Structure formats: C-alpha cells, structure tokens
Amino acid sequence: AGDGPFFLGKHFSIVDIRFIPFVERQEASLAYFKGFVLRDATRWPNLINWMEAMEQRESYYSTKSDWYTHSRALPPQLAAGCSDEASGEKMRTQIDSSPAGSSLVSSEPGEWFEPGWEQHPSYDAATARREAAERIIHNNQNIVSFASRGAGIPGLPASSAPLADPRSTTNASLKHPIDVFLRFVVMSMLSNKEKSGNTQSFFQNLMGGKEGGASTATSAREAMMTAAQGLVATIALEGELGGGDRAAEAVADCLDYIRARIGTPRDMSYPAAREFRNELLHCASTLRRSASTEASSVQEEFAVTSSVQ
C-alpha cells in the first residue's frame, strides 16, 4: 500500500505472513537454478521495500531460511522441474562454496554473504560463532551420531531428496574422533575474533600456516592436533578402513556429511550456519591434507627402503 511497506500499508498483517514464505522460496530458487537476482530496487522498489521491512522484524528472522537450504537441503517443491541453467553457475558456486559436497572440500570459503540478513542479531561474525557453538554444545551427542552416517551404510531404498538418508546406519567406531574434531570446531569459532576470511583459520594455524610455511601454531595447539591425529590413526576400525590415512579420510567424510546438511532455521540462523560450515570445511580440508602428507611420507620411506635393499 502507498502509506507503508506492508500489504495493508503501515500495518503488518496475516497477508504478509501468508506471502513471505513463497517469495522467500522463489527468491532462493531463482537465484540458485537460474542466476536471477530478485533484489533489484530499481525494477521492483515496492517488493524490495516490503522484503526489507519484513527483515526488520525479529519474529520473521526466527523462521527465515537461507538459499542453500531452500535449493539443496530441500527438494524443489514450488517447481519440481527446477534444473540448473548455465546462467546460474556463478550464483550456485557462491551459494555452495561452503556447504557443498566433496568436490569443494579443498576450496577456501569465500567472502560472499547472502543478502537479506543485514538486520539479523547474529550478522556480526563473533555473535554468529557463539550461536553456532551453543547449538553444537547443546546437541553434541546427536550431532556426533548423525555425522557418523558419513562413513556408515547408506539406507535403501534411497530417498527422493538427494541429501536425505533416513535409513542409513551410523559408524560407531568413528564417534570418538568426530567428537574430538567437533570440539576443535567449537574452540576455533570461540577463539577467532576476526571476521570470517580475514585471518588464517584455527586449523590452518594448527598445521603451520595457510601456505605451508613455518609454523605459527602455539605449542598447546600443536599438541592438541598431534593428539587428535594420533587418535584418528589408531581408532579401532577392525581393519575396515585400512590405515590411518583412510581413517582421516573417513572422519573428513563425516564432517562433510553434516556440513552439507545444516539447515536454516531448523538448526541455526544463516549467519551461524555460515560460520559453522566454514569451520567444518577448514577442518575436513586440514584432515585430508594431513592424510595426503602422511601417505606421501610413507611412500617415500618405502621407496628409500626398497632402494637400499
């Protein structure tokens, strides 16, 4: 209406409540599948004013989802025939940069931040990390058990939603190391005071710096990471995974499994989910680099031993 941003002008009403979930889902699907950005105030000023007015309401933020959850964690419901188009490739890469599957585990999380969250109480990175840490601590055992599905047995028949696997079984032998690395994730989020992406990650510091140069880690952090890697290398897997390097890959797979399935707002707000996803990405990447380095060292040692013999 002309006298205010809402459907009934200055008065927020049931009409706004009924329409916002559909527009929110359409905005996410258009961006992800088509690369079409709805937030253009020059083309649709009234629509953008209405969306921004809604986003100033704390009650709406408690129900607001993010583009990744709408497009990946949930099957397309408004348009079951949604398909990726070339025009949306750049936007899909931005949306998937942290949560996506194993094809992106070696990439660094980007600076892109989904629009529409500027008024959220957790928009500040430090607040978002505290929110994510609280959710992990509050639900630790269930998160650990759920993550262990990443190295469990997939359920049959498969679900129609690609990321849903309600019939899968957990891998109990991996729950201890998963718990250890989730504790590292919490420590990282609570100790990193800077905006995400501006400093080296806790896990990169543990491994000696982003570029693999001289170590900048404290002796305490080095000791913690060494202990954790020793745990991964010696966990009792009854020979199923064939060595410490494969065990590290299995734990990284489990961290990826939960990272791809963090839902907003079911699990936490988008700013908190973004921080959690980024830290899980760093942790899994560190594990894989460590496993790769260890495997290379073993191969070199074997080659030297063979040549001597």
Image (cartoon, rainbow, N blue to C red):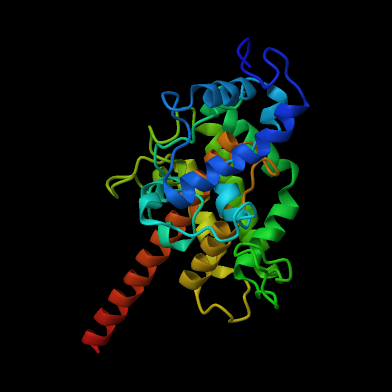
- Counting from the top left corner in percent of width and height, residue 193 is at 49, 27
Say which of 230 and 31 sits in front.
31
Q: How far across and how far down the image is residue 50, in percent?
A: 59, 23
Q: Is residue 249 left or right of residue 87?
A: right
Image height check: is 158 above or below 202? below
Residue drawn at x 47%, y 31% is 39
Is 128 drawn above or below residue 135 in the view shown? above
Residue 63, visible in the rendered structure: no
Residue at the farthest right position: 14
Q: Is residue 95 visible?
A: yes
Residue 182 image offset from top left, x and y in percent: 60, 49
Could you tell me residue 132's position as x and y percent? Answer: 63, 38
> In the image, what residue occupies the spot 45% across and 34% down?
196
Quarter holding residue 14 = top right
177 or 138: nearer the viewer? 138
**In the image as oriented, which residue stretches furthest toward the front?**
2
Query: Viewer-proximal residue, 40 or 153?
Result: 40
Residue found farthest to the top: 3
Please name the residue shown 55% across and 26% down the image.
Answer: 47
Q: Is residue 172 above or below residue 41?
A: below
Q: Is residue 303 above or below residue 68?
A: below
Q: Quadrant of the N terminus?
A: top right
Residue most extreme to the left: 307
State the count of labels. Answer: 0
Closest to the observer, 92 or 100: 92
Q: In the figure, residue 286 lies in which quadrant?
A: bottom left
Q: Quadrant of the C terminus?
A: bottom left
